[in-house]
Image (tube, rainbow, N blue to C red):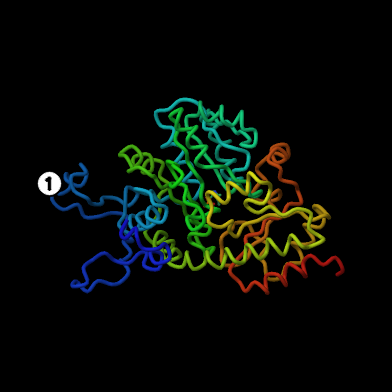
Amino acid sequence: MKHPLRSLATRCAHAGSSDAPASENPPFHQAIAQSSLFRLGTSADAEAIFSGERPGHAYSRFGNPTVDQLANTLADLEGGSGALITSSGNAAILCAVTAAMAGRSGPLVTHPGIYGGSFELLKLLSEVYQLQVQSVDPGNSEQWNQSLTSAAAVLLETPSNPLMGLIDIAETVTRAQAGGASVIVDNTVATPYNQQPFKWGADWIIHSTSKFLNGHSDLIGGCVIKREPLTARDRAIHKNLGGTVNAMEAWLAHRGIRTFALRMQQHNLNGQAVFEWLQQRPEVATVHYPGFRDAHQIQIRDKQMTHPGALLSFELKGGLEAASRFLDRLKLIVHAVSLGGMESLATRPAGSSHRGMTPDARQVAGIPDGLIRLSVGTEDISDILEDLAQALETSP
Ligand SMILES: *Cc1c(COP(=O)(O)O)cnc(C)c1O
């Protein structure tokens, strides 16, 4: 944490700059350490580096100066003590779940609203390694609270994807921690601009940096951030699972983060405007946006989010057929998976991100085949609304 008192926008604008003294005439941006290995020096130097007596690097899977710098920036943005950089959001979930469950017994408790890729990963881990996974609806508070008490660890996603359901982080943390379980929050959709889970006591935060944090839809990456200092075991898990990144990838993610706060201001304005516009349209049956379902959801949003954000989903009165027609008619908005890019993106979760779920599991999660998810970009709002309007038109 360089200057925790400076605002997030200021810290983003300066992210990735070199710490070297100005008298050394350093480049403003730290040089990219694109190397798999580092000279160890004398045997005594090597001993000092490997024993941890002196900071240093040996091999880039274990650590790399460019990657370390990205870790510092991400830990700082979330207010954590340390971060581990991973090759994808899924690798971050694997790493965080492994670290949070190490030495614990009992199930990993999660809920049906987690990202489709996370659902597939946990299913795989339970089939291959017999990881116990318990997926409970947080709306069923009695069962949810009971599971939290006996959990080995908890994985939360709020807002949930794609239905934008909210879970009270502070309440979940209090119950989980009473039973000794750590809580991992996937903060990819909310981003640290709109929600700071460590404020509410979460132990771990994971991100897919492929989304809003990088923001340019040009790389895949992730990170695991810890509220408490990282232990030697946490670092050993990260290094041995192997989902680490090259310096160039870390540098690119860092470059994206420099405009993160600026982009989020526009994403938030556009997200709110699209939500309000869709609600007025006669073709639209339901719009899902954080904190708009009922009084309890509004209360959670007002407590833990500074803004509902730029991701929403909606159903058309014409169902699947109308949804396919809408996607086929889009001209500006891109029919593609993923979210958080500067370009607006539309997808049909049942046919893409949530395809790995069985139709039954999708029904439990409440994802109809005609649901459309929209990641509202940073384009001029009138262009976004014009495209939505022409795509919704029923005459050819
Ligand atoms: C995309 C995403 C992930 C997975 O990230 P990848 O970078 O694609 O591996 C995890 N959680 C959420 C909420 C996501 O949107």
Q: Residue at x 56, y 57 (%)?
A: 307
Question: Percent from the top left, x then y, of residue 269?
Answer: 59, 66
Q: Nearer the viewer, residue 115 or 123?
A: 115
Instruction: Answer above or below: position of 147 versus 191.
Output: above
Would you say residue 127 is visible in this rendering?
Answer: no
User: In which quadrant of the rendered view does residue 96 lie?
Assistant: top left
Neighbours of disc 1 within 10 Å: few (<14), some (14-19), many (20+): few
Question: Percent from the top left, x then y, of residue 45?
Answer: 15, 49
> Left or right: where does residue 111 sit relative to residue 193?
right
Image quarter where the C terminus lies is bottom right
Image quarter where the N terminus lies is bottom left
Would you say residue 135 is visible in this rendering?
Answer: yes
Instruction: Answer above or below: position of 366 versus 390.
Output: above
Q: Nearer the viewer, residue 356 or 376?
A: 376
- Determine whether the beta carbon of the residue marked 1 sits less than 8 angstroms from the nearest atom of ligand 1: no
Q: Which residue is mark 1?
A: 44
> Left or right: where does residue 213 sit relative to residue 363?
left
Question: Percent from the top left, x then y, of residue 342?
Answer: 56, 67
Q: Residue at x 60, y 37 (%)?
A: 111
Q: Nearer the viewer, residue 144 or 229?
A: 144
> Left or right: where does residue 29 sit relative to residue 330?
left
Dot 1 amino acid type:
Ala
Q: Residue at x 61, y 29 (%)?
A: 142
Please, what secondary structure does the residue beneath circle 1 have? helix
Instruction: Answer above or below: position of 358 versus 159.
Output: above
Q: Nearer the viewer, residue 29 or 195?
A: 195
Question: Percent from the top left, x then y, of residue 15?
Answer: 37, 64
> Left or right: where does residue 118 sit relative to residue 359?
left
